[in-house]
Structure formats: C-alpha cells, structure tokens
Image (spheres, rainbow, N blue to C red):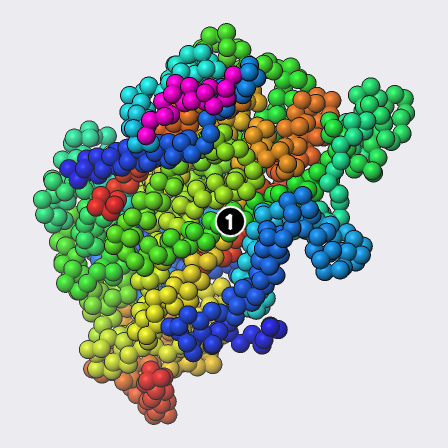
Amino acid sequence: MRYYRYIGTRVLWAFVVAFIIVTITFVLLSMSPDPSIQQAATQAALEGGDPQEATDRQEKLRGLDEPLHVRYIDYMTGIATLEWGWSEYRNQPVTKALWGSLYYTAQYSIPWTILTLLFGPLIGVYSAARMYSWKDHVVTGIAFLGFSIPNFFFAIVLLLVFGVWLDWVPVAYRTDVPVVSLENAIQLALPVFVLVTGSIGGILRVARNESAEFQNADFMKTAKAKGVSPLRAYAYHVMRPTLVPLSTTVVGQLLAMFLGASLLVEVVFGIPGLGRTTFDALVAQDTNLVLGSVLLFTVIGVIGNLIEDIVFTIVDPRISYDDR
Amino acid sequence: MPPEKPERFDQVDWTEYANPTGWQRSTNTRYFLYSTVPVLALGLYDWLVVGPREATFVRLGADLGLSGPFQMIGLTHDPAGIDYLFVGTLLLFVWYLLVPLYQNPRMTRYYWTRFKRNRPALGGLGWLFLVFAGGLIGPFVLNTPSQDILTAHQPPAFTSVDEATVPLCVGEVENGRCYGTWEHPLGTDNTGRDVFSSIIHGMTISMQIAFITTSVVAVIGVSVGTVAAVSGGWVDEGLMRVVDIVLSFPTLPFYLLILYSFGASLSMFILVFALFAWGGTARYVRSKALSVSEAEYINESRLSGASTSYIIRRHVIPNTASSIITQLTLLIPVFLLAEAQIAFLGLGDSDVPSWGQLIAAGRTDLAFAPWIVLAPGIALFLTILAFTFVGDALLDALDPEAKTEADR
Amino acid sequence: MTDDPNAPLLEVEDLSTSFRTDSGRLVAVDGIDFTVEAGETVCLVGESGSGKTVASESITRLPNSPPARIDGSVRFRGVDLFECSDTDLRQYRGNRIAHIFQNSQLNHCYSVGWQIVEAIRIHEDVSKTAARARGIDLLERVGIPNASSRFDDYPHEFSGGQKQRIMIAMALAGNPDLLIADEPTTALDLTVQAQLVRLLAEIQSEFGMGILLVTHDLGVVAEIADRVVVMYAGKIMERGDVFDIFERPAHPYTQALLDCLPERANASGGIPGSLPDPTARPEGCRFADRCPHTLEACRTGGQPPELEVESGHHASCIYYGQGYDVSVVCDGQGESDDCDGQDESDNRDSTDVSKDRERVSEANKR
C-alpha cells in the first residue's frame, strides 16, 4: 500500500505546486498596470472626459477597488471553479476559447508524441546495437542536427521549400477540412515532422547511451546462456531497463518542446491552436485570455511532471517509496 | 603566476591549508575581486554622474581630459546595465576557468588530449571562439548597421537577384540581374541594414545571454545544492521542494505573462530564464555533494579538523565542477533558442539586434530574399550545434566515471 | 544434428578464443582440450586471468564475436556445437547446457519468476501457469523459503546467496545434461559458499548431470571435484584425478598454487611475478618466468606437450620428458617425493630450490 500512498503524496504535491504557481501569477498581475484601465483612461481623455473617473469606473468594474486579500480569494476561487473570465478578443468565455484551440493543438500534438515515443527508444536501441557502425553515426548525426536546428527556423525553411517552391503542402492552414482526412494529414505533416525531429534527438541519445550500457550488462550474458534470441534479448532485456532513465527525460523533453516550440510552430504554420491563441491574446492585450493560456500551460506542465513521477515508479521496481 | 614545474596533477594552494578554517579567500578569488573594482567603479560612475542621454565614455573622456585620445581610438560607447553584468561574468569566467586551467598545465593537457579526440567538438569550439571574438570585438569595429531603404534587399556576394526586387543595386547590373558586392557580404535586409554586421552584433547578444544566464544559474544552483546537502533536515527538504517548483515552472508562457505585464527587455529575459533554470543544477549538485561527502577522503579531511565550509570549497565543489560545467554548456542552447523564439515572435526587446529578430524581419521576404532568414538562422543553428558538441565532448573528457564506464 | 547417447557428454578439442583489442590480438584461451562425462564434476582451476572463464563461456559461444574469435571444436554428445547455426545452438543453451555465473546476473527490471518462466518457455511449449508451477517447484528445490509468495519479487529483494540459488534454479529449468558453473560461490561469504557447494552436489546426484566448475578456490575443488584441469595463461598445465593433483602435484605451477593454501606444509603465501602479457606471450613454457626450476630449454619452442606423470595424470612440463631429472620438480613436496620411479641425485638443483624459496619468501615480505 506504500505504493498508493506514494502516488497520493505526489498528486497532492502537484496541487500544491499548481497553487503556488497560480499565486505567483496573481502577484505578478496585481503588481502590473492593467492595460484595460489605461485604455479606459486614454479613451476618456480623448473624448474629453475625466481620466481619473474613467479609471475608477474601470477598476470598480473589474473589482480592483477591493482589498488585496479579497481579490486574491476571488481570483483563486475563480480559477478553481474554471471561471476564467471573458475574452474580449475572441468574444467568448476564456475556457471556451482555450478549449477550442486545444482541439487544433491536439491534432498535431498527439501524432507528434506518439511518433516520438515510438521511434525515439526504438532507433536509440537499434543505434546502440550497431554502435560505431555507419548507421549509428548517421542516427547520432541526425539526432544532433534535430535538436540543434531552431524549430521555427526549420519550419520556415521547410515551408519555403515544400509549400512555396514545390507546392506540395498548402501554405495556409485550413480549419475547414475534416480531422481524419488526407488534406489534414498533409497540412499537419510538416509541423509534426519539425516537432518530431526536435524532440526525438534527446530521447534517442538517452536511449542509445543507456542501452549501450545494458547490452553489455551481466544479465545479457545470462539471457544468452538461457537461449534467448538476440531479438528477444533486445526487446525485453535491454529495452526495459532503458525505459527507466528514459522515463525521467521523455516527459520533460516533450513538455519543454510543447511549452516552447509548439507556440512558434503554430505561429509559423498558422495553426489556430493554443500557442497561436496565446500569441494573439498578447498582441491584442486580452488580459484574461493571456492569463488563461498561461494557466493552461501551467496545468499541463504540472500534470506532465506528475505523469513522469508515476511512470518512473511503474518502470523501476527498485524505487523506494519512502524516498521523498 | 607563471605555470610552475608541474610536479603534481593538481595545484595545491598551501596558503589555504595554512589557514583552513578562517574566512580566507584563495588567490584567484582575491584577483577576481580586485579586477571587478574598476568595473564596479565605472558602473557607479555611470549610474551617479553620467546623465541619461550621455554616452558614458564620452563623458568619462571629458572628465578625465582625455577626450582626444578617446575619440581617436573610437571609445565613445555607452554601456548599459547588461554590459556591466557581462563584463563581470567574463571576469568570473577568466579567474575561475581560464586561469586555473593555465595554472594546472598538466591537468589541462590531460583534458585537452581527451577533448581533442572528438572532432566535431573541436570544430564546435572553433566556431564558438569565432562567435566569442566577434561578439567581443565586433561592436567596437563595426558600427551598428544603419537603415537605408534604398539599399534594401541587396543580395550576398557572388549571388544575384532580379533587378526588379532591389530598389537600388549597389553592385553591378548585368542582364537585368543585380549582383552582390563585398560591401554587403551577406546582403542587406528589408530596411537596408547590412546582414553581416547585424550577425556580428547578434553575436554580442548571444554571448551576453550565454555568459550571464549560466553564471546566475551556476551561482544559485551551486549555492542551493551545497547548502541543502550540508544542512540536511528541514532546510534540505524545503530547498528541494523549491527546486521541484522551479523545475515544473512553465518558463516560456510565464515569461510571456511577465512581458505582457511589465514590457520586455533583454535584462528581463535573462533574469527570468536564469531564475527558473537552476533547478536541475541544484538537484544535481546536492546529490553529488551528498555522495562526495560520504567518500572516505572527506572523513579524513574532517578528522584532520577541516570545517564544513572548507570541505565544500576544497572537496565538494571541485569534485562537482566538471559535471556542472558540462551541464551549463548544455543549458546555453536552451537560452539562446528561447531568446531567438521570443525575438522571432516580435515580443523581444526591439532595441536589441538579435538573430531571432533578424529572422523575423526576413520572414515576409523569404521567397525572394532568403538570405535574410538563412544567414542568421544558420548562425544560430551552428552556435547551438557547437554548444551541444562541446558539451557532449566535455561529458566524455571531464567525467572520470564516464571514462571507466566506457573502458569496461 | 541428432546426438549420440554413447558419445562423451562434452569433448573440447583445441579450443582457442582471442579478442580484438586496441593493443593487438589478446589470446585468452590458446588451444585447450578436456572432456566432461555425465555425472562427473570437472574443475577448471587457475588464477585470475588464466582464461578459465573465457574457456567455459566459449563452450556455448557466449562471447560476442566480434570482438571474440573462437576456434577449435566442442562436441556435445557427438554433435559439434561450433558447426551449428546460431539458431540451433540456442536449442542447446539453457536447455542441454546451462550456465551459472559469478555474481548472480539477473535482470533488475523483471521479477525472478518472470525470468525463470522465460527460461522454461523458451525451450518448452508449456502454458504460463504450468511454467509458473514448475518455477515455484524449482525455487523450492534450491532452498528459497516461501517460494510461491516470493516468486514475483524482484532480484534486489533477495540476498546474494539467494540470488545465486535462483540462478541455479533457472539453470535447472531446462533439465540440462551439463551445468557450467563459473565461480558460483566466489562473491559470497564462507557459510553460504559451503551451502551452495552442497546444493550443487545434491543436484548433481539427483539429476545426474555433468558439471564443469570454474574456480580459483581450491577448497571448493577439494570438496566437489572428480577431476581437475589446471590452466595458466590460456594453456593447460596439468590434469588428473583430484586426489592425484592434491597429493602429488606434478607441475611447478600446480605446486605453487597449492602452496598458496595456508594450511599446506610449504605454505608460501603467493607466487612471485605476474601473468605474462596476454597480447604477447613469451616463447616456451608460459610459466617459465615464475618457475623456480626454469631451464634453458623451458624458454624455447612452444608450451611443452602434456606428458604422463602416472596413469590419468598429465603435466605440461619438460621435466617429465626423456632426459630430465624429474626429482627436481618433485622435491620438497612433503609426503609426495614418490612422484615417479626416479631417484633423487642432483643436490645442486635442490639447493637452488631452497634459494628460490628464500627469494620467494623475501619477495612476499616486501
């Protein structure tokens, strides 16, 4: 039962982390001037009204005249009850706007994650089995290039080559095609490719270096002496221990990419997903939507770290649950 | 400090052993502190005396009565806060990395022979040296590229474009095609700025990001890690929980929020990213310090009366240093990439001519003037690749455990 | 591919194993032969680095090639294993010929039950539940308490001795005809060692298998061996019945090895010098550099052929050939000065021996 208690502690801790991060966002926002108030003041000044009065009105409207702790409690309950406010820019509730954009983000994130998780460890172990052969050098070279090439730059170049010059893929993302259709697959091919090359490199390298250690491990000799075929030995005896160190890097790697590169890739390819929404909200000075997307990214990050912890306990039988 | 006869693998600083418990600084620390004095003085002078619209060195020249010589060598710069920080971290780098390497020639040679085996890393080091030199010297030699709409979209040397795409061709025009010139070896962008000198100026930005962020990360990470390991108990527990939070912080979205609330500047970028990147280093230093402090020689040292702070300085940090350096080398690409991404989105500091900004500027003209995107993109790519290669080689060269592993 | 039940269980002939390394070709095993019959225990003895482990692993071609190159022939019940394809050879590994290694080498990510079931199901088409039941039986047989409840525990939850017992259980999974045990007790403490040696002996009498035991622990050899093969620097130095070897060691190396036992009359506490460089072996007898009786003739040619000391007892030493005074190497072996029908005459050599002994003990003091 120690196992369930351990998981319980981790889940609880995830809530604490989320709570702290949300509190920091509140501190940040309450310290900074609200652009809508400035807007109101400017508006009033332009129309010949009293800027101060307009500011007060706007503050009252947004509940900023309350004492700090009341606002803090309001803020936290609002976030906890998913009342994230109204997005002026999208003219719909923030949660709805985010949900809508998540739909597009998922369309490339899911294939990207699956491909990375599938091919990263496989190619890494293959490369280790053929260590120092030309195939291994090619694989390592691609891994290095993949995570060194700036994703947005790579995306631009690919779009130029395949979209503009060769005209194989549409330059503008189309939202009117069905999710499961050839057109959608074609227009998502480049973003998925860019993201996979970016994220697979790190995973592949960890898989290669770790499994290189395991393929010469003592237990491989035991397996061989038992009569286990080489394929089975790699598939079970090498792959499984490799997953342990891998599990601690995979989620972090994917999350880092998700929080950073996907934003850029969405902007470059014009996918109206989460990253694009955040960017547009920033440009349009839509406080609620900016805050909402930051919160959503936070939630995803916290959940990702939680998954990493849980996966680690599943793959490594040696972990002691009293450790933390 | 000439390199003495290398009798030992590592140099022993006997002055420290003579006084192992007191607040005695090592020679290098003393030199480091001395060398920061002029920088600090200049910074204070800049802050207190020089007016906001004056260039610091022009004013300094006037005050010292050296305007003439200053003007002659082109010293008319106005360093910003970040430049002082940059110089400070460079001094840190010199006194704690380069000088110790020079003082221990035998150790340096040993590492160097192992590092040399990795060809790509050697190439990477060469490129990084170019970027470093370009970033340091470039701004003093090349002026900030000026805008001139008439010379926009000039092609790089040895290439040509259709005459119609260029407002005014600087080079020769043959058969309706405009040829590039050496005046603009990498062409010009959409506002007529020279791409080559933009890239050189971008090197300064990249180097500033690389040095300052890693210094901040190193200082915080090493302090938190060692304090946690040595204190143990609730201090350790608390600090490690803070590390947990720092590690699960969504830095980029958060930076966007800060940028949204407070506006953007390069210093803000460096601050935010450095403040949320030390988690891994701290965790690593802590675990390493714990395993080191259980080693036999630490007990010996403790038995012979060494204090905790002495043990940390003389044993724990030197033993973790190589791994920390490796880790930091591999962190730099993350920072560079993040800055480029933000600049590319147009959310960065618009006063800072970074590579990301150049890429963003060239994006609309990609179809007919690809060099504006390609040149800085490739520079960024090569720099990140170089850091990755060097970090990878350092991992092999500096980590004795990795070595024995490979030999088995 | 069918085997001949009348043929010897294991015949190793001219087995050589070498490895490609940065400093040249490393010859670990240099043309050795020996046989193991069903029901008998043969011990392969030698100091660390003598090539005995590589020799035992080469029997089923376990070393990866490259870098290893394995030559010679290994016949198992008349079938040459080195002529087999990899797929055919896997039918022998674990099934007919089982291995146990030093430090139980279990995969830390799988439960011991999983690993035993794997060993069973690779060679036999049985259901998981049947394999599991048999696995639990095997664990019980090797003396794991509460075998059924511990079946799904992971290796790190067992002690070193228990892990080695699990290795033995896994080796028994295929009902092997030959068990190759490589230093199975070295890493364990003395009481556990004794228990495991007893377990091996019991299992042998129960299953009637042949055992090839690789060890440097002469105490274990004395307890369990029927015949002994002494290896040094990739070559066989001496072979014979366990009693002959312990009572009348013929080869100077065996003598020196036995003198290392503290309870022996001439306990020396060590052999001076070290093994010759395996990438560049010297001419002549491999042991010549460390031998107290070295002659000029010892340093030329190859390793001397194995010469008969008495019936079923051979030594690779020129003193047992024509025209050499065998008493030189037999002298000073306590009760064993009757090693062969020759009388002792030359006093000069025996004083040399005592001088050498002085030198040896001095070297050991240092």
Q: Is residue A63 magenta?
A: yes
Residue B141 visible in this rendered orientation of the protein? yes
Q: Is residue A56 magenta?
A: yes
Above or below for C92 versus A156:
below
Which residue in the structure is indicated by mark 1? B214
Q: Quadrant of residue A25?
A: top left
- Residue at coordinates 32% horizontally, 59% vertically from top-left? B230
Q: Residue furthest left?
A: C146
Q: Chain of mark 1?
A: B
- B278 vs B106, left or right, is left
Stretch of the chain drawn in magenta: A49-67
Above or below for A126 versus C316:
above
- Residue at coordinates 58% horizontally, 48% vertically from top-left? B81
| Residue sitting nearer the eye, A207 or B131 | B131
Quadrant containing the C terminus of chain B is bottom left
Q: Position of residue A202 (x, y in %)?
A: 47, 38
| Residue sitting nearer the eye, C242 or A73 | A73
- C103 vs B185, left or right, is left
Q: How many residues crowd mark 1 within 10 Å: few (<14), some (14–19), many (20+)?
A: many
Q: Position of residue A292 (x, y in %)?
A: 40, 23
Q: Position of residue A150 (x, y in %)?
A: 57, 33
Q: Position of residue B249 (x, y in %)?
A: 40, 37
* Amino acid type, callout 1: Thr
- Residue at coordinates 62% horizontally, 33% vertically from top-left? B350
- Residue at coordinates 61% horizontally, 15% vertically from top-left? A171
Q: Secondary structure at mark 1?
A: helix
| Residue sitting nearer the eye, B169 or A305 | B169
